[in-house]
Amino acid sequence: MVFQSSLKTCLQLSCILRTPKAGFRSSSGGLIIQSVSNDVYQNLAVEDWIHDHMNLENRQVLFLWRNSPAVVIGRHQNPWQECNLRLLRQKNIKLARRRSGGGTVYHDLGNINLTFFTTRKKYERMENLKLVVKALKALCPQLDVHVTDRYDILLDRQYKISGTAAKLGRTTAYHHCTLLCNADKFVLSSVLKSPYKGLKSNATPSVPASVKNLFEEDPSLTCEMLLDAIAEEYATRHQTDHQITLINPADETVLPGINNKTKELQTWDWVYGKTPKFSVSTCFNIAYKDSVLDVKVDMDVKHGRIEGCNIDLPEQWLPPALCSELVKNLTGSKFCPNETTTLATTLLRVCPQDDDLHSRWNLLCENMIMLM
């Protein structure tokens, strides 16, 4: 692969962006870059690109980025277990799966993301977090912030303002962390609360924590001030120029192949299909006319697709043949509202022309979709 040398040439020739701040320095200490994009998939793709293609032997990199509203789950997590997918769809909030492990986080423009790239040998996330704390204290000496043994940063000894995750490759590594500045805490708490019942999974669970924004402690702060303070501390640590270089995550001339990485991160097979195998065993009630029906559903889901399904309900309420047809069609399909809606609509067309039967069928399918 020629990507490492081609990127090095690009950096030295300062051909990243035609702006006053553009142009990577050829210093061998540290390099500070900031994304001009607020798209979560593009910014995660930059992380992948640097990790996969950049030579970090003589230069460490700090990547600064912010996203429009998004929920980002860890590499080995279950999105149904971690967040309210229905609410995400209603609010048009993106869901992304990153390459690193760790727990689920909410991003918006009131949250800063920092990614520290090094060789694997030089990887040290505690030092990175101490750098962030030092920058915060230099900017606001009154802040009571410290790093915990779990690699979180706490404010006032109790409120989490930063969480950590990492990816360790064969020769390179990165550690990234969040920094809550002025995030929408109501949306954060709403979307990071799963409504789904009866899930059994071996996926990595997130650890809930009380959170607080830095701006609540000091309203005079801005995200730009915090980014600049962290960049300055990083430059001092690595004895390099305190200059933030802007980068366009869609620029193929600087990051060859970056758009393919972005597209992959948006695919259903990556976001949902990489979910570790899980099962759903739950009951729900259907109120119809003067009766209430109890329905029990069991499903096994692998790679985001329904591997096995059983629906237990009285046969006088729905003909067994029709229920069997639903189970048969669900098996092998995506555990996904859109696909199940299409499937249910298609099957309804072959149902006997009976308004009462159609109503019962629609109620059953609507409740099945609510499980997804």
Image (cartoon, grey):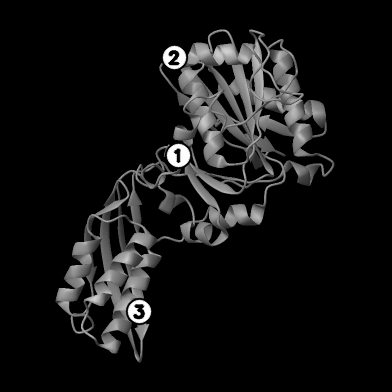
Residue 261 at x, y percent in the picture:
45, 33
Disc 2 residue type (three-letter): Thr
The quadrant in which residue 135 appears is: top right
The mark lying in front, picked from 1 and 3, is 1
Q: Which mark is residue 263?
A: 1
How crowded pointer 3 is (Cα within 10 Å; few <14, some 14-19, many 20+) is rated as: some
Residue appearing at x 31%, y 58% in the figure:
280
In this picture, residue 224 sits left or right of residue 43: right
As drawn, the residue found furthest toward the right would be: 220
In this picture, residue 153 sits left or right of residue 280: right
Query: Which residue is more in the foreground, 346 or 274?
Result: 346
Q: Quadrant of the C terminus?
A: bottom left
Disc 1 residue type (three-letter): Lys
**Disc 3 designates what residue?**
286
Q: Are marks 1 and 2 in contact (CB under 8 Å)?
A: no
Q: Which mark is residue 171?
A: 2
Residue 338 at x, y percent in the picture:
38, 61
In this rendering, is residue 173 above or below 325? above
Residue appearing at x 21%, y 76% in the figure:
350
The mark lying in front, picked from 1 and 2, is 1
Q: Which mark is residue 249?
A: none
The mark lying in front, picked from 3 and 2, is 2
- Disc 3 secondary structure class: strand
Q: Quadrant of the N terminus?
A: top left
In this picture, residue 316 sits left or right of residue 123: left
- Disc 1 secondary structure class: helix
Residue appearing at x 37%, y 66% in the figure:
369
Query: Which residue is more in the foreground, 58 or 207?
Result: 58
